[in-house]
Amino acid sequence: MKSSSKTKTIHYKNCFITGEVVLQEALRKTLSKESIAGKPNNRQQQINGDDGTVVFINRTSDYRGMTFCQLVVLESGKQQPFITVDDEAEFYSIDALASEQIPEKKKEGEEKPKSTKKNSDSEKVRKRKEFVDSILYFGVYGNHTVVLQSSSLRTRELEAHLSWLLGTCTKNIPDNAMFVLKDKPAESVYQKLMSKPVKSIKLGAPLTKDASNDPSSMTEIQYENVDQDEVHASKVRFVPQGLGASMLRAALPDGFLEDLKLEESLDDANIHVALEITYLRKTTKIGQKVIDSVATSLRHLPESDVVINLQGGGRISGDELKLSGGISVKFTDSGLVDESVLFHEMHDWLLKKISSSEIDTNIEAP
């Protein structure tokens, strides 16, 4: 694979930790060699009990005053599908490669060391290869955080893991401390939102589905000359899911959506659920405070379509409530991210936002 560059979106988050804790200082302390979480093996958070899937900070480094980290998720023993492209074949064969079958990558001029079976078995236990499911990159400068998300690791997962790592794992923040990675709109949008009261909020989301076997349609099939019965699922039930479904569940009787017993997907139905929050003619100070608070909180709903209408005119869309931007991400010949270029781009982007007063700098970096 030849080296290439792609434009990727990075997101700004402001970290809030009760007790005047600065994220960068806490992170450096947590990942230091002297810490109980100094090695990746000691800072792995299990995702779903005993299924072998873990998330953890792998590599960390400093670049021009910022602390950069890789957040990695992997599933032990996972098999990776691959396809064999054969121009002469009638079809391409698909197989799977287990993690223990990953070949050793020997450096040029390096000879394979001799080892006994005992040493070899010990080495396999201590040092093994696993497929990496996903990598998220983030940089921290004081309480300012810049994030490059991946397909399965988003800022929500980063917030949850950092809260666990700094709290439950290392006790570097108190158990009762609040840990939040807050979205922040550009300063111009924030001033626009603060300058006028909110007149109405429109929140919309598509109605999507989740497929599952329908237990109500299990059929028992009898086979001649066979001593046992087999039970098969004859139907797949499509249950509405997502933000649109959540809004409907709040408004409709319990179990209404589940009782629809949909036999087809909703993906092509183009059903859109909309919620409008407004007031008639005028409201009280308390009512205005409620609607203004709802407006500023909706930035935490990435899957929704948000439109905020201000009194006397003016409109703010949901994507304006987040501070993000595009950077050029370079990939090496092997398809991996060129981290030196990535860290430089993320560092420069953040400093430009700070210098242009789009980011509040009340909390200085160490």
Image: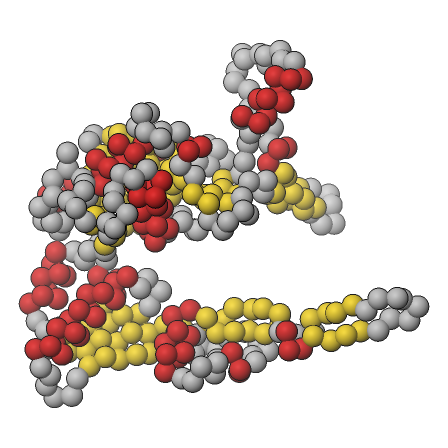
Whether residue 120 is visible, yes or no, is yes
- Tell me where residue 164 appears, x and y as whole percent: 35, 45
Furthest toward the front, the residue is 175
Q: Is residue 212 above or below residue 31?
A: below
**Residue 360 at what x, y percent from top left?**
11, 49
* Residue located 34% across and 50% down the image: 160
Would residue 353 be seen by someone viewing this image from the given angle? no
Q: Is residue 231 left or right of residue 65?
A: right
In the rendered view of the protein, which quadrant contains the C terminus? top left
Residue 287 spot, x, y in % from top left: 13, 79
In the displayed structure, 178 sits above or below 35; it is below
Residue 231 spot, x, y in % from top left: 75, 69
Query: Residue shown at 59%/36% (left/top)?
Result: 99
What residue is at 56 percent from the left and 69 percent from the top?
211
Residue 31 drawn above or below residue 206: above
The image quadrant that residue 116 belongs to is top right
Q: Is residue 202 left or right of residue 352?
A: right
Say which of 134 and 58 sits in front: 58
Left or right: 199 with respect to 136?
A: left
Q: Is residue 41 left or right of residue 129?
A: left
Find residue 124 and report its image quarter: top right
Furthest residue in direction right, as rendered? 225
Furthest residue in direction bottom, as rendered: 281
